[in-house]
Every structure is written in structure tokens, then in C-alpha cells.
Amino acid sequence: MRLSPRSPNLAEYLKCSMGGLPIETFRVLFLDPMHRLIADEQMQAGTVDRLALFPRTLFQRAMELQTAALILVHNHPSGCADPSKSDIAVTNQLMAIARTLDIDILGHVIVTASSHQILLPDLKTARGSAGTFDLRSDGGQARTGDFGSADERLSLALVNARRAIRRRILRDQLLDAPGLFGEPAWDMLLEVFVHQAEGRPISTSSLCIASGLSMTAALRVLPRMEEAGLVQREPDPADGRRNFILLAPAILQRLVAFFEEYDV
């Protein structure tokens, strides 16, 4: 069954199942591309008028379930379903993060035992990255913690880089003519970036194989990338015959900035 935050049946179910809870509780409906339910999970519980929400936990779970869309839900024990300024701000922030991961947030339903409201935020003003948010029913301002840290930026960039590689593979399989699309150096940079962001360096031979080029062609491209200051070699301390390929520090930072915003 296709779910919508505007569904009267869904609203009644949510009011009955959590509208009367004595503490604020955050719940998420994880949906497939047809907006059918994959999972219905409680993500966080708080106090009578406030709960701390951790976006990283939410979106990690969404990626694990291969989620295409989300419906967010939380309750107001006060009995008033009107959204607070904090509710609106946090929903907009989550919408912005979801957009970078190619996940749709269909709405944020606020429920009490007898009423509900639906937030459908305007993405034009929504920006942000994963940190820690407060949902408050008292109208307080949303608070963020560790917002936009280096680790969070790298995590977001890594997700987008992985998606770029998957899209490249699918494109090449579909068109059956990989030599006509893209630059070998760019594909090699993607491979180095993903390996480096995951904390597992890539050897010269592995990079050449991953590039999709012949070994001879890849070994011609790699020195040009070194001369341009894009990558550098580092000897493998466990095997003196092998070198790892790493991004130059400045290039690593540029790619992090690029993939933070890159919409594949």
C-alpha cells in the first residue's frame, strides 16, 4: 500500500499508537521507491517537551534499508499539535540532508491523542549537514551541535562519491561504450578519493585495474596526474615493492567540498 503523510488512515494510526505518549518520541516510516512501507521504527525518545535528534543515526539506517523516501513523525505530549519554530527548522535541515542522499522526505507528522499537523517544508531555504538537533514543543529555537564538522563533511562527501562511482558503472554497462564517456584521470581520482575516505589506501596496480583502462594505458595516465599535483605515491611500509596512491592534501579538500554539493 502506498503511504502518504496526508493519509487520514495513517494519521489515525499514528494518533492511536503514539499520540498519548507522556514523552516526546521520534519515529520514522522508511519507504521504498513506490512509497510502500519497508520499516516503521522509533528512532529517539526524549522528555515531556523536548528530544535530541541525531541525523547521522537516521540516515545511516535509511541507507541500510535502501530507503527511497521517509515520513517523519513525533508527538507533542502537551496536547497541542501546532509545530514549533524548532520543529520547522529541524525538518528543513533534515530535508536538506536527505536531498544530498537522493532520499525524499514526504512530510513530518506531529501528533497528539486527538489531533495532528503535517509539515511540508520549503527546500529553497533548507541547507545543512548532519549534527545534533533539538525538537521542542515549547517554541524554542533549534540547536545544533558539531554542525558541519570535518568528519561529517567527509562522511557526506563519501556517500556522494560512492553514488558517482555506481552511476558511472551503470552508465557504462547500459551504453556499452565506456571509452566514449568521461576522462580516465577523473575516474581514477574517484577511486582514490573513496579508498582514502574509507581509510584503506589503494595500490598502484589496484588503481589501474579499477580505472577500467588497460594496465599500460593507466600507467601512462598516472604519471601525468602526479605531475599535475593531483596525487602522490607513498611506499607500502609492509611491502617495499608496492606503492600506495594518495590524493594531494589540497586536492582532497577540493573533492570533499565538491562532493558535499554534488548531485548525481
Image (cartoon, rainbow, N blue to C red):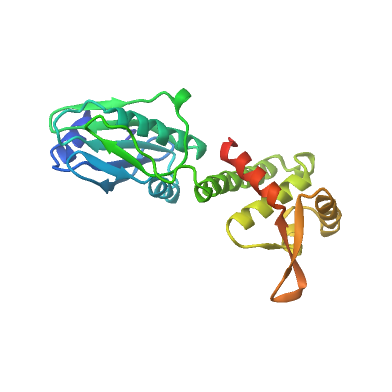
In the rendered view, tell whether residue 112 sits above or below residue 212: above
**Image coordinates for residue 140, horizontal then vertical, percent:** 27, 32
Q: Residue at x 55, y 49 (%)?
A: 154
Q: To which quarter of the image does residue 144 belong?
A: top left
Q: Residue at x 28, y 47 (%)?
A: 44
Q: Quadrant of the N terminus?
A: top left
Out of 32 and 201, give the one closest to the viewer.
201
Q: Quadrant of the C terminus?
A: top right
Q: Residue at x 19, y 34 (%)?
A: 76
**Image coordinates for residue 47, horizontal then vertical, percent:** 19, 44
Q: How many marks?
A: 0
**Image coordinates for residue 101, horizontal then vertical, percent:** 50, 40
| For residue 223, side relative to residue 2 (left or right) | right
Q: To which quarter of the image does residue 7 belong?
A: top left
Answer whether residue 6 is visible to the viewer in this image: no
**Image coordinates for residue 207, horizontal then vertical, percent:** 73, 58
Out of 12 and 20, give the one closest to the viewer.
20
Q: Residue at x 59, y 61 (%)?
A: 199
Out of 170 and 209, give the one closest to the viewer.
209
Answer whether residue 223 is visible to the viewer in this image: yes
Q: To which quarter of the image does residue 238 belong?
A: bottom right
